[in-house]
Amino acid sequence: MEYKIKTIGVLTSGGDAPGMNAAIRAVTRTAIYNGIRVKAIYRGYKGLISGEIKEFNTQDVSGIIQRGGTILKTARCPEFRTTEGRALAYQTIQREEIDALVVIGGDGTFTGARYLAQEYNIPIVGLPGTIDNDLWGTDSTIGYDTAVNTIMDAVDKIRDTASSHERVFFVEVMGRDAGFLALNSAIAAGAEAAIIPERRTAEEQLIEYIGNGFRKSKNSSIVIVAENPEIGGAQGMADKLKELHPEYDVRVSILGHMQRGGSPTAYDRILASRMGVAAINALLEEQRSIMIGIANDEIVYVPFNKAIKDDKDVHQDKVEVLQILSI
Ligand code: ADP
């Protein structure tokens, strides 16, 4: 018997990222273009369990491509981690006659989706929506480019005060397990160093930075630090430097949630639009349990298992670029 998707559900889950709205728009319009109905699910898996659902037409996604955040809201949902919670979610799926799901989020979102797909016979396609860029199999995630640009702009401003006062600034950015934001924004903003989780210990990286003689030719310095509670983040690094070099005027700036917000860059809007179209095409091709990725500017399908589990490493050449250009 031929299986045809008549209705899809779409949700955003986990941490919000700029470009999620562009993705919602593309998914909605591509589905409708193909004669598929769209049920928008609010507040991620929480709304899937409680049935917070509204049918979308093409106008419901008008005027949102330029907006940060997500019009569908997002939430963490501990209940979805249990088989009972997912059973309730599936009841909603059946009641609403949803034949397939598009989930927009990060690795947690895909882990949950994979469980649901294993337990119930439901096709699910994921779109990588996270500023961290920490999913394997895609060169970039939706929101990452915007976040790098936001950090770059902030660091440019910090640079003005750092050089006027001849200070050393430790700027903390998001990315607990991944240094993509820190390394790339450091290159873009011309920072002197980035302290990232992928390379040796933070302390060794700090010692290396000091050893590079950062004060020989410059009167100010900026070090980007990927947030890491174990080393006390940027504050921990600043305390360590003050201990070793009490003569330096050391300051800390934690950028925080501003990194998640703002209007998405052209790159993120285009990426989200292409990925949203690809999600519906993948479902029409009877794909399931995959994430849409981008590799060498081509759309690729990445099984959830690989996207979640395999570690994506930062490019070693970028570590060298930063080192060479900060002398
Ligand atoms: P992200 O998708 O950005 O990584 P989270 O890690 O917060 O964000 O995950 C989003 C949601 O996905 C969680 O609130 C939870 O509902 C679901 N989820 C995460 N991990 C699991 C898991 N191991 N099993 C089932 N559901 C999960």
Image: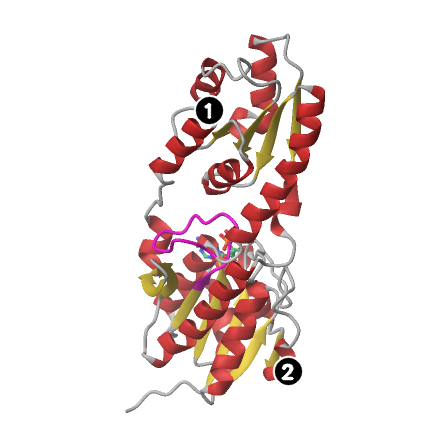
Q: Please state the horizontal and vertical placement of residue 272, each as a whole percent of the image.
A: 50, 65
Q: Nearer the viewer, residue 263 or 118?
A: 263
| Image quadrant in which the N terminus is located | bottom left
Q: Secondary structure at mark 2?
A: helix
Mark nearer the N terminus (1 vs 2): 2
Res. 255 in view: no
Instruction: Check mark 1 vs ligand 1: CB closer than 8 Å? yes or no.
Output: no
In the rendering, which numbered label is found on residue 325?
none
Question: Magenta region: which residues?
Answer: 127-141
Colouring scheme, one of rainbow, by chain, secondary structure, one colour: secondary structure
Identified at 43% across, 63% down, the residue is 113
List the residue tagged with mark 1: 202
Pointer 2: what residue?
A: 59
Instruction: Answer above or below: position of 92 versus 296.
Output: below
Task: Report whether 4 appears left or right of 180.
Answer: left
Vertical arrangement, residue 200 with respect to residue 13, above or below? above
